[in-house]
Structures are given as C-alpha cells and as structure tokens.
C-alpha cells in the first residue's frame, strides 16, 4: 500500500469528499447525524517557572467517539485545533490513529501553525478498509511550548483552552467525519488548560545533594547546612517535611525514609520534579537535577 503526505496541499472537507469519491462506495447510509460523534481535546494543568516559561510545555490528545446511533464505518476525517498563540506554540504533531489490521493510512496531512494544528486523513483510497469509533479512539497528539509574554513574570494562574476551529489554513480546513462519502460535523469538546506560575526552580524534596536521587548524602547534606554552614541554593529541597524551615527534623525525615521501616518519604514534590506550592521564605534559586 502506498502512502501519501501532500505537504504543499491544504485539505478541505470538499477535497476529502472528492478523494473518497474515487474509492469503493457501499450503498445505504447509516442515518448518522454529526452529534453522534464527539471530537475531544484533552486538557492540562501546567506548573512553570515564571522567570522562564519557554522551558516548559504540555501536550494534548485529540480523540473521537461515536456516542450514539448505529455504529458507522469512517473513511477519513479532517480537523483543526486552535490555541492562543500568545500563550502556547504547537511544536510537534503526530498521528495516533491505528487502523484495523495494522494498516497505515493512505493520506495523512498535518500542518502546524502558530495558532493551531490541522490534520486530514484518508484511510484507504480504494476503500479497502474503514474504521469505527464505538470506543474512544486517539487521532492526534500535539506538543506545545509555553510562550514568553503574558506568562513571563506572572503571579496568578492563566486559563486558556484548546478549541476545535474551522478557520485554520488557507483555504481553511473543515471539521468532519466522512462516512460513505458524506461529511458529518461532530460535536466538539474543548480542552481546558491552566498555566500556574511559580517563583524559583523545580526540585525534588529531600534531595539536598541535587543529584536526582534520595540517599545517605542528602541526610548528611542537611546536617552540614545546619551545623557547619555548608552552602545551599535550594532550601526548599532541604525542607523534607515542608514545614517552611530547615531543621534537624528534616535530616531525620530523610534518613528514616531510607533506613526506618514504614517511615514516610519526603513531602511533595517527591520522588519526581515539581514546584514547592507552600508559601514560605525558603525558595529555590537553582536545582540542576530538574529541567
């Protein structure tokens, strides 16, 4: 089977119908209406360093589900997912559809624009196979980078959304599911996105040595800071119990997490990287183990 990716061509709904009209047509429509299908973009909650938002990103998955009606066999689809270009920039888009029998698709065109992403897919030009969406089916994955501008130096959470739009591209790409040569506009569910700024760097709590792991050196590092004045540029990491200050209790918390059966680990963020959401005076200027 030959596959096509026409990078210089914008796929509209009428073009998709024209392409499919050359394939195998099976008589008898299913009686679908567009609202039988729900096209959905997943949302995201993103924490980022207010001083450097472009170092952070997020992703969404576009999926489709036929929620009602007689299960139909789709020949293809086209869609557009818009974003606020002052907040998010799409950088990577990947087709996630797995057709039946392990086939590839004959036509897959993805366009990445500052204000969104479009995709047009035809499963099989000669109509050799189709696909149904009776279960939630992933179609497209998109990765975004946060932008400078309104997010830089922000002190409050910003809310935005990933919306399905039919205004992207020139000519614009329609939003439709194609069944037996007929185009059906699906119901649309936007993805809600929250972008929460933080002062300082992300960290792993309890990891005083900043090597990305919790071990004996971390308990010793906290004691060295307390009793011999060792330097520390991420005090939030030393505050293992998230009390808002660094004390011998934090060293004990780390050592017991390692060597005392049943003892709790350090508080969040642990064991992965994250931001300290507790208001205190400690701060974290630098933490190389977290991006």
Image (tube, grey):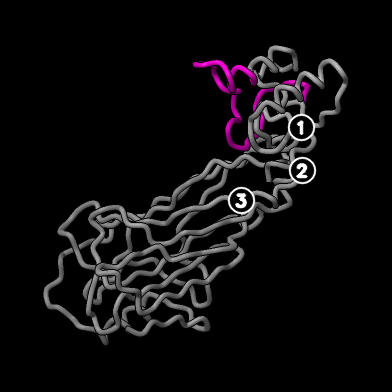
Q: Earlier in the sequence, mark 1 or mark 2?
A: 2
Q: Closest to the observer: 78 or 240?
A: 240
Q: Which residues are magenta?
A: 254-283
Disc number for residue 284: 1
Residue 177 position (above or below residue 214): below
Residue 224: image location, x then y, percent: 81, 21
Residue 182 position (above or below residue 201): below
Q: Magenta stretch containing residue 24, yes or no?
A: no
Q: Magenta stretch containing residue 257, yes or no?
A: yes
- Numbered disc 2: secondary structure: loop
Residue 242: image location, x then y, percent: 66, 19
Q: Residues within 10 Å of mark 3 (few under 14, many from 20)?
A: some
Query: What is the spatial separation of the Cα atoms under label 1 and label 2, in whole angstroms?
Result: 13 Å
Q: Residue at x 42, y 57 (%)?
A: 62
Quarter of the view holding residue 199 = top right
Disc number for residue 123: none
Residue 283 position (above or below residue 146): above
Do tag 1 and tag 3 residues touch (Cβ < 8 Å)? no
Quarter of the view holding residue 102 = bottom left
Residue at the spot of label 2: 51
Q: Residue at x 75, y 13 (%)?
A: 247
Q: Earlier in the sequence, mark 1 or mark 3?
A: 3
Query: What is the spatial separation of the Cα atoms under label 2 and label 3, in whole angstroms?
Result: 14 Å
Q: Residues within 10 Å of mark 1 (few under 14, many from 20)?
A: many
Do tag 1 and tag 2 residues touch (Cβ < 8 Å)? no
Residue positioned most to the bottom? 22
Residue at the spot of label 3: 57
Residue 143: image location, x then y, percent: 55, 57
Do tag 2 and tag 3 residues touch (Cβ < 8 Å)? no
Where the N terminus falls, by quadrant? bottom left
Residue 31 position (above or below residue 203): below
């Amino acid at each position: 089977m030959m596959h096509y990716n026409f990078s210089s061509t914008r796929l509209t709904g009428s073009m998709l119908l024209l392409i499919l009209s050359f394939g195998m047509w099976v008589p008898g429509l299913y009686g679908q209406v567009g609202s039988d299908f729900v096209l959905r973009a997943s949302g995201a909650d993103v924490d980022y360093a207010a001083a450097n938002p472009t170092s952070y990103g997020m992703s969404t998955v576009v999926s489709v589900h036929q929620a009602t009606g007689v299960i139909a066999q789709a020949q293809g689809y086209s869609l557009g997912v818009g974003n606020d270009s002052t907040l998010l920039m799409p950088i990577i888009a990947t087709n996630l559809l797995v057709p039946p029998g392990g086939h590839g698709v004959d036509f897959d065109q993805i366009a990445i624009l500052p204000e969104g992403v479009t995709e047009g897919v035809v499963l099989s030009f000669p109509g050799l196979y189709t696909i149904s969406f009776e279960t939630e089916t992933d179609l497209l994955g998109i990765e975004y980078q946060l932008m400078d501008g309104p997010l830089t130096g922000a002190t409050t959470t910003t809310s935005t959304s990933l919306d399905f739009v039919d205004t992207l591209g020139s000519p614009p790409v329609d939003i439709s599911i194609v069944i037996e040569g007929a185009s059906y506009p699906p119901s649309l569910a936007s993805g809600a996105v929250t972008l929460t700024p933080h002062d300082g760097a992300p960290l792993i709590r309890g990891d005083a040595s900043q090597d990305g792991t919790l071990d004996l050196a971390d308990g010793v590092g906290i004691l060295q800071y307390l009793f011999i004045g060792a330097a520390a540029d991420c005090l939030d990491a030393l505050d293992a119990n998230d009390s808002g200050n660094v004390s011998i209790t934090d060293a004990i918390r780390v050592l017991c997490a390692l060597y005392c059966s049943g003892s709790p680990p350090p508080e969040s963020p642990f064991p992965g990287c994250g931001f300290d959401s507790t208001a205190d005076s400690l701060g974290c200027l630098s933490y190389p183990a977290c991006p």
